[in-house]
Image (cartoon, grey):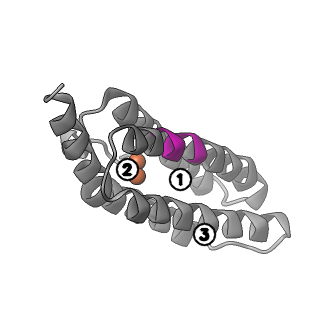
Amino acid sequence: MAFMIWNNNFKVNIKEIDLQHKKLFDMVNDMHDAMKTGTADEILKPILENMLLYCNTHFATEEKYMILYNYPDFIAHKWAHDNLTTKTKQLYEKLKSGETVLSFDLMNFLKDWLNNHILNVDKKMGSFINSKISFL
Ligand SMILES: [Fe+2]
Ligand SMILES: [Fe+2]
């Protein structure tokens, strides 16, 4: 069974963002599969690097929508993105310097963060933007 399972509850109803979230789920699942087959930090490094790059793209997309629609919770939402980016970068730097990162802790951290962020923070943004779009 997949580590992260997508269902319609995660939809924010903005197509571009929903597709990116699905891709993030896939990336976390790929990372989890790689870990199960060895937990080698050498395997983890490029995967985590890709994840960081994709998170940057994804966060920039959401921030673009929030700015475009003048979203009132933009600052708090962006802070959450920046915080995750900083934490993931720190883990990546640890890996690069040869330190062993507790892989399953990392997986659970990413899974919990994504689940909570999408369900509590992104969905609020989605509702707001959809309410604006329906007024146009
Ligand atoms: Fe998101
Ligand atoms: Fe977000």
Residue 90 image position (x, y, % from top left): 69, 70
Q: Is there any visible trace of residue 113 in the rendered image?
A: no
Amino acid at circle 1 = His
| Viewer-proximal residue among 19 and 127 | 127
Q: Are marks 2 and 1 in contact (CB under 8 Å)?
A: yes
- The residue tagged 1 is 32
Estimate the spatial distance between the alpha carbons at disc 3 and disc 1, rounded to whole Å.
18 Å
Left or right of residue 118, residue 103 in this image? right
Residue 17 horizontal/vertical position (percent): 38, 35
In the figure, 25 relative to 72: above or below? above
Name the element at disc 2: loop
| Residues in magenta, as a range | 56-61
State whether residue 63 appears in this view: yes
User: How many numbered discs, if any?
Assistant: 3
Spatial separation of the CA atoms under disc 3 and disc 2: 20 Å
What type is the residue that disc 3 sits on? Lys
Q: Are marks 3 and 1 in contact (CB under 8 Å)?
A: no
